[in-house]
Amino acid sequence: MSDLQFFGHVIDNEEVESIDAARFDVWNPWTREVWAQAAEASEKDVERAVLSARRAFDEGPWPRMGRVERAAAIHRLADLMEERADDLARLDSTNMAKPFAQAKHDVARSVWNFRFFADHQRDAVGEVYPMDSGHHTYSEFGPAGVVAAISPWNFPLMMASWKIAPAIAWGNTCIIKPSEDTPASVTMLGRLAVEAGFPPGVLNVLNGHGAPAGAALTADDRVDRVTFTGSSTTGKHVMASAATHLAPVSLELGGKGANVVFADADLDNAVYWAVEAIFRNAGQICLAGSRLFVHSSVYDEFMARFVEAAEALTIGDPFDPATKFSSLASKRHFDKVASYVESARELGGTIRTGGVAEDGSWIVRPTVIDGLPLDAAPYCEEIFGPVCVVNSFDTEDEVVHLANDTRYGLNAMLFTENLSRAHRVASRLRAGTVWVNCFFIRDLRTPFGGVGDSGVGREGGNFSREFFTEPKAVVMQIDRG
């Protein structure tokens, strides 16, 4: 056991064990072996993390710091992340079997999250409201307080940075609880924040499970904001917990994204992005294009190309440069995804390619299924794995109805060379983000979030400012005549 790496909590700028010294095992999904241990937070550890963050906000320099100085501190953290990019990527690859090249991309995106929000808060301005009554009114945006952030296991560092960066940029202090499946890179991020010179308590990392750690954190009335990314079921519990002390919540939850390929689509482009949308990160993406609708006139040609492209993905060790696809992130998740695949034939579907590996690994091969009825579980429910369910359509109205016929609404894609159709259909799709002829392209100024079971609220640019601050109106009398 002494050879195992250890990831503690980072509280008040110190990496510490849990008060009761409890730990949990951290698995490598590719080797199916324990490679590390992490501190297991109890309610007492939550208490000291909240006290640290509260003290740092109420008494410390961070929320009172000038915007330029705060931006410079965040850029120092981003610099350190770039210097240690390989180390951060290696932790995510080891922790969830993410191909190393993809993990490097995630680190770069994480660095950009910090740099963007550092500059966004530095350069942001309020508004002035002219009044005819002899008054001068303006708005300002002050930090909200202590932010509790809970991030998922599928993009461990990137999703944590998406929450931490705007929270601290706007002068808040933050407690981040990464998923118990992937604590490594976020703990290292906490270490780098100390190295970057962050004041104690500005960024605390709390490792542990949803219960008791996550539940105690979201229910604490000293927490002013709660931001969570994860399953819709857990999101509802988080929202209920935060409601006990009226803390605003931002929830980015599940998805069952529709990917629509019209008859006039550039099929080479559509196939490329369809593969990226469902098989990147082994399909463990809330934004995955898991429901694929192809116009009947190009269905056979598209499917032949799509299946061929899926079968061409190299499956293997995440550290092999040739690998494009590897294991699922945990045995628990593998069992869930495998159950959907194994039920597909019984429900009337045809597995065109893929299936569950039979070598004892936690691999579900890139899987394409068609012929499923529209009420079948693999069609309706979020699988969160490399499983694409394909259907044909004939008319625009039909496919818009099919795309919107879900309780989720995080994202959608459409492929067409018809400009009018692109605008028209994008407006009709019930989704927080619609990509046209592409996928996974982000501008951090734009709103990000979903409708229905896909979440509550939006983040990004000014939308993050609205959530992580307390907007204030200041009204001044300037004419007493």
Image (cartoon, rainbow, N blue to C red):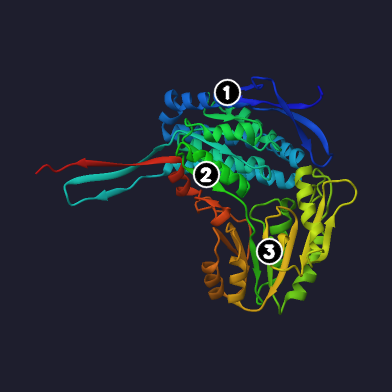
x and y, in percent, of residue 356 in the image: 84, 54
x and y, in percent, of residue 120 in the image: 46, 44
x and y, in percent, of residue 126 in the image: 35, 45
Q: Which numbered marker is on residue 13?
A: 1
Query: Which part of the image, by quadrant, shows the N terminus?
Result: top right
Three-letter amino acid code at the position of disc 3: Arg
The kind of secondary structure element at disc 3 is: strand
Q: Residues within 10 Å of mark 2 (few under 14, many from 20)?
A: many
Looking at marks 1 and 3 on the same chain, the residue that comes earlier in the sequence is marked by 1
Q: Residues within 10 Å of mark 1 (few under 14, many from 20)?
A: many
Q: Which numbered marker is on residue 291?
A: 3
CA–CA distance in space, label 2 to label 3: 32 Å
Front-lying residue, 40 or 328: 40
One can see residue 115 in this view:
no
**Relative to 361, residue 5 above or below:** above
Three-letter amino acid code at the position of disc 2: Phe
Q: Residue at x 67, y 25 (%)?
A: 8
Three-letter amino acid code at the position of disc 1: Asn
CA–CA distance in space, label 1 to label 2: 24 Å
Q: Residue at x 48, y 26 (%)?
A: 54
Between tags 1 and 2, which lies in front? 1
Looking at marks 2 and 3 on the same chain, the residue that comes earlier in the sequence is marked by 2
**Relative to 38, residue 319 above or below:** below
x and y, in percent, of residue 116 in the image: 52, 44
* Residue 330: quadrant of the picture: top right
Between tags 2 and 3, which lies in front? 3
The kind of secondary structure element at disc 1 is: loop
CA–CA distance in space, label 1 to label 3: 45 Å
Between tags 1 and 3, which lies in front? 3
The residue that mark 2 highlights is 116
State left or right for residue 164 relative to residue 262: left
State left or right for residue 58 relative to residue 311: left
